[in-house]
Image (spheres, rainbow, N blue to C red):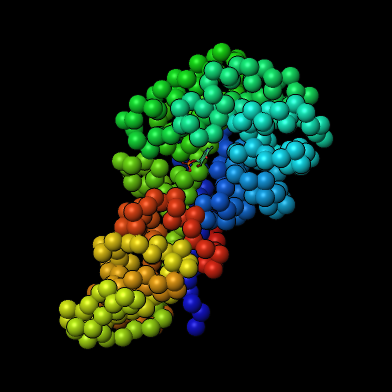
């Protein structure tokens, strides 16, 4: 008997979600964000399945290399730029596109000779105050980048801080600042929107959109479910029951004996824990689905196992499949129980969990 703990990745759902992006931003090109191993889905498999994407976005040089070595031919953007002169030279050799968000990265480009001129995205700080050149210095940096021998083309980008919150005033102010800068520089290519941003309509979409989360079928908006946005969950996290027992009334279950049976209770032990990426801190509302029935978690989540009350499924037995999240149990719900966000849960599924790809 195998442990049966796996993340089933539905590549059809991924492609469906990509089409939703196309439909929502028909005039924009799509840079599919596949950093953090494709938000835990497997960056290479995701990039291969998204053959219609116009480019891919990653955070690190290593992530870009993995894609290229797997034969991905589309442009790959290093969204945090390079970290050293050596990395700049390698990025040019590999024909990666780079972000420039700090003055020292501009200085590198001015001083280091590169094998091939690069496409550079000047990242502007329009209000998030994380990465980006301050607005008042952008015109100058724009001109300086254009004067670099190692720069083939300069594009503009920025990142939204609060796009998940439709009513947040920062959205409009960032959007206006970015549009003004596009006009002032005369830039022909710009990008502002992540998933939540692109859902806000054409004013945010510019020439390129950069969706991540919505490609994976999770909702980027606080107020709308994935289903309401016509997105299909790509990851289904599954495991199995590996032990069952009847815990007598009055006895406790698990570490620190935090849960006590009020009556004789059938307990199933499920082969998944925080060592697989299932969050350790979930509220008392947490449940899993077994044969479509809600079975509450009881006791602490341990490294390799969770314990569930299987009263609702009298025929649950060894090897019975268990759904942790997926189509019938949105990852957003688990995130809520865990006091976190869907992004984190998807990214933190560990390597121990086999990824199984479905394309049918
Ligand atoms: C610069 C940049 N663009 C786009 C994205 C994609 O964001 P999302 O997953 O919310 O669509 C990210 C992800 O954090 C990012 O850092």
Q: Nearer the viewer, residue 50 or 56?
A: 56
Q: Quadrant of residue 261?
A: bottom left
Q: Residue at x 48, y 77 (%)?
A: 3
Q: Position of residue 129 (x, y in %)?
A: 48, 31
Q: Residue at x 48, y 36 (%)?
A: 194
Q: Nearer the viewer, residue 50 or 209?
A: 209
Residue 113 seen from this side: yes
23 sits to left or right of 164: right
Q: Residue at x 52, y 67 (%)?
A: 353
Q: Is residue 215 above or below residue 247?
A: above
Q: Quadrant of residue 202?
A: top left
Residue 26 seen from this side: no
Q: Nearer the viewer, residue 331 or 110?
A: 110
Q: Quadrant of residue 224?
A: top left
Q: Position of residue 208 (x, y in %)?
A: 55, 30
Q: Is residue 125 above or below residue 249?
A: above
Q: Position of residue 277 (x, y in %)?
A: 46, 63
Q: Position of residue 44 (x, y in %)?
A: 62, 53
Q: Is residue 159 above or below residue 61?
A: above
11 sits to left or right of 110: left
Q: Residue at x 37, y 52 (%)?
A: 340
Count of numbered circles in the view: 0
């Amino acid at each position: 008997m195998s442990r049966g703990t796996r993340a089933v990745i539905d590549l059809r759902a991924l492609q469906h979600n990509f089409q939703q992006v196309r439909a929502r931003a028909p005039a924009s090109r799509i840079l599919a964000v596949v950093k953090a191993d494709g938000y835990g889905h497997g960056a290479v498999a995701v990039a291969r399945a998204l053959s219609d994407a116009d480019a891919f976005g990653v955070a690190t040089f290593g992530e870009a290399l993995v894609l290229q070595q797997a034969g991905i031919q589309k442009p790959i953007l290093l969204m945090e730029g390079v970290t050293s002169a050596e990395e700049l030279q390698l990025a040019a050799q590999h024909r990666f596109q780079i972000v420039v968000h700090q003055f020292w990265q501009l200085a590198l480009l001015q001083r280091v000779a590169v094998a091939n001129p690069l496409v550079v995205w000047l990242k502007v700080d329009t209000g998030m105050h994380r990465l980006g050149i301050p607005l008042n210095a952008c015109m100058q940096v724009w001109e300086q980048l254009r004067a670099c021998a190692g720069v083939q083309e300069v594009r503009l980008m920025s990142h939204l801080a609060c796009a998940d919150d439709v009513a947040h005033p920062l959205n409009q102010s960032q959007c206006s600042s970015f549009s003004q800068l596009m006009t002032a520089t005369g830039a022909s290519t710009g990008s502002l929107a992540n998933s939540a941003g692109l859902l806000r309509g054409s004013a945010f979409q510019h020439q390129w959109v950069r969706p991540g989360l919505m490609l994976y079928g999770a909702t980027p908006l606080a107020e709308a479910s994935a289903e309401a946005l016509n997105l299909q969950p790509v990851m289904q996290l599954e495991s199995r029951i590996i032990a069952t027992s009847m815990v007598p009334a009055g006895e406790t279950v698990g570490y620190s004996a935090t849960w006590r049976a009020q009556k004789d209770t059938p307990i199933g032990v499920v082969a998944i824990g925080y060592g697989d990426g299932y969050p350790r801190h979930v509220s008392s509302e947490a449940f899993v689905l077994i044969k479509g029935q809600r079975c509450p978690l009881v006791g602490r989540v341990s490294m390799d196992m969770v314990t569930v009350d299987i009263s609702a499924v009298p025929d649950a037995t060894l090897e019975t499949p268990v759904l942790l999240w997926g189509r019938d149990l949105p990852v957003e719900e688990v995130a809520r129980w865990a006091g976190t966000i869907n992004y984190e849960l998807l990214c933190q599924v560990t390597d121990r969990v086999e990824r199984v790809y479905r394309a049918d």
